[in-house]
Amino acid sequence: MFLFCEIAMFSLLYAHPYGRHSYVNQHLIKAVNALDSFDLRDLYQAYPDFYINVKQEQLALQESALIIMQFPVQNAYPPSLLVQYINKVFCQGWAWGVNEQQQPTQMLANKILLVVLSGLERDDCDGVDNAKQKLQLVLQPLQHLAQQCGMQFAAPILLPLRHLLFDQELAKIATQYQQNVQQLLQQHILQQQSVQQDSEA
């Protein structure tokens, strides 16, 4: 579904009910905003009434080599608007399955990266290991989504909130985030170049 070009576009689906007030998330977004072909989709700002423009979102995502989902986890659940978005936008006949022309629609050219800020380790009285297990359960449906859509599931970036106490450490994490995105985009460009060369051979 992705059209090859030398500069790979990527979309960041940012789902935070109080996104503008989240210092950590804003710092992370600023880091990747410095990259070329960045499309920020602030879901709570765009759809406060939860009425999602499905066609518009699909058009944006089909141009993206990399789709990032950045969101907090509280009480062992992702934000409800993100769940609504996935159910509406990543639908059968567009993201997976076959379309009206009986053609496969899997998003084979896309990669997906999860960036998750979790307070579970801070809040869970049963300890860090139990909190990590809960977080993995949260991510399993999203990993299944990637598999169903034929997308490449990149290693998630998991950020326990209890670790984000100092600006110096946050800056280090933001830099690593930016580098991870650059690496994924470069991998995509190289893969597309290889496919193009094979088709011309």
Image (spheres, rainbow, N blue to C red):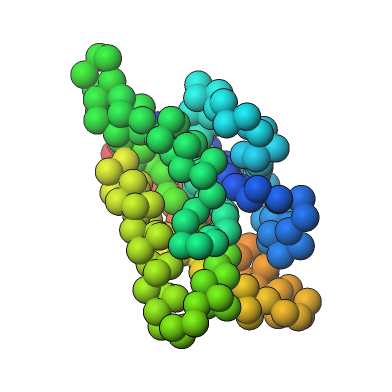
Q: Is residue 90 visible?
A: yes
Q: Is residue 13 left or right of residue 18?
A: left
Residue 176, horizontal then vertical, whole percent = 61, 71
| Along the line of sight, the residue nearer the viewer: 25 or 96 | 25
Give the residue at the far front of this rendering.
125
Q: Is residue 23 left or right of residue 5?
A: right
Give the residue at the far left of this rendering.
102
Residue occupying the point 44% across, 83% down: 126
**115 in relation to 95, above or below:** below
Question: Which quarter of the figure is the N terminus placed in?
Answer: top left
**197 in relation to 135, above or below:** above
| Along the line of sight, the residue nearer the viewer: 32 or 119 | 119
Residue occupying the point 49% across, 82% down: 125
Residue occupying the point 40% across, 79% down: 130
Q: Is residue 87 left or right of residue 176?
A: left
Residue 75, horizontal then vertical, whole percent = 50, 62
| Along the line of sight, the residue nearer the viewer: 146 or 195 | 146
Residue 148, horizontal then vertical, whole percent = 27, 43
Question: Which quarter of the figure is the C terminus placed in?
Answer: top left
Give the residue at the far top of this rendering.
101
Residue 10, horizontal then vertical, whole percent = 56, 44
